[in-house]
Amino acid sequence: MLISVAVSDGILITPTNSCLGLLDPARIAKLDSRGNHVSGDKPSKEVFLHTAFYETRARTGAVVHLHSPFATAISCQSAIDPDDCIKPITPYVVMRVGRVKRLPYVKPGDPAMGTMIHALKGAVSAVLLANHGPVVAGPDLRSAVFAAEELEETAKLMHILKNVPHNVLDEAQIEDLRKTFSH
């Protein structure tokens, strides 16, 4: 898991090859407001993903990137709609996550990740990196983590329901949720 949080004078981000259970707070990487490494260990090679969300979504206060199994499995599927790859099975995925785009595969750490996020112009708060995993932005760390969990649970439901006729929320229901809970 890779986590970043916006602070008044930059970004705190977990360092490369870190394990959250063993993470020493003194080793957390700090970037200045321009994305330059200021202190702590070397930031993750995927820092471009994080800075791109902060630069394109004014409400972003935290970004979470996972390699969670069900969302990553969805990211590997060739038959999904890349513009809307997580189906609105429950109201909570609409309320907490919104529409999720799958971005084309690029190798981990490629600056093109940031370029692809910039190209979305803040239109989504979550993406699936093809054959890699989800990245979710939120107004704060708690919201970003809850949204990442909701995305993973919905991906799990999609897997469970893949061979079973099932309902998804229709456009009117989705729009009602968006108006009521403005994502």
Image (cartoon, grey):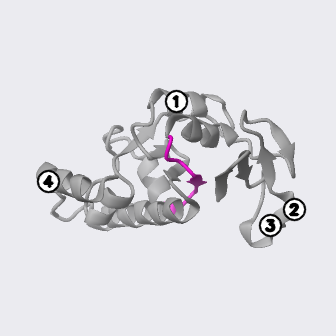
**Would you place residue 165 above or below residue 13 in this image?**
below
Task: Mark 1: give few (<14), some (14-19) or many (20+) Cα within 10 Å.
Answer: many
* Circle on res. 26: 2
Asked whether residue 90 appears in the rendered view, the answer is no
Residue that mark 3 sits on: 23
Is the residue under label 1 in contact with that under label 4 (CB below 8 Å)?
A: no
Q: Amino acid at mark 2?
A: Ala
Mark 3 and mark 4: Cα distance apart in space: 43 Å
Nearer-N-terminus badge (2/4):
2
Q: Amino acid at mark 4?
A: Asp
Nearer-N-terminus badge (2/1):
2
Q: Amino acid at mark 1?
A: His
Is the residue under label 4 in contact with that under label 3 (CB below 8 Å)?
A: no
Q: Amino acid at mark 3?
A: Leu
Mark 4 and mark 1: Cα distance apart in space: 29 Å
Nearer-N-terminus badge (3/4):
3
Residues rendered magenta in the picture: 58-69
Instruction: Name the secondary structure under disc 3.
Output: loop
Mark 2 and mark 4: Cα distance apart in space: 48 Å
State which mark lies toward you, 2 or 4: 2
Relative to the observer, which residue lies in front, 162 or 101? 101
Apparent side of residue 18 relative to residue 122 in the rendered image (left or right): right
Residue that mark 4 sits on: 170
Residue 112: percent from the left, percent from the top? 60, 28
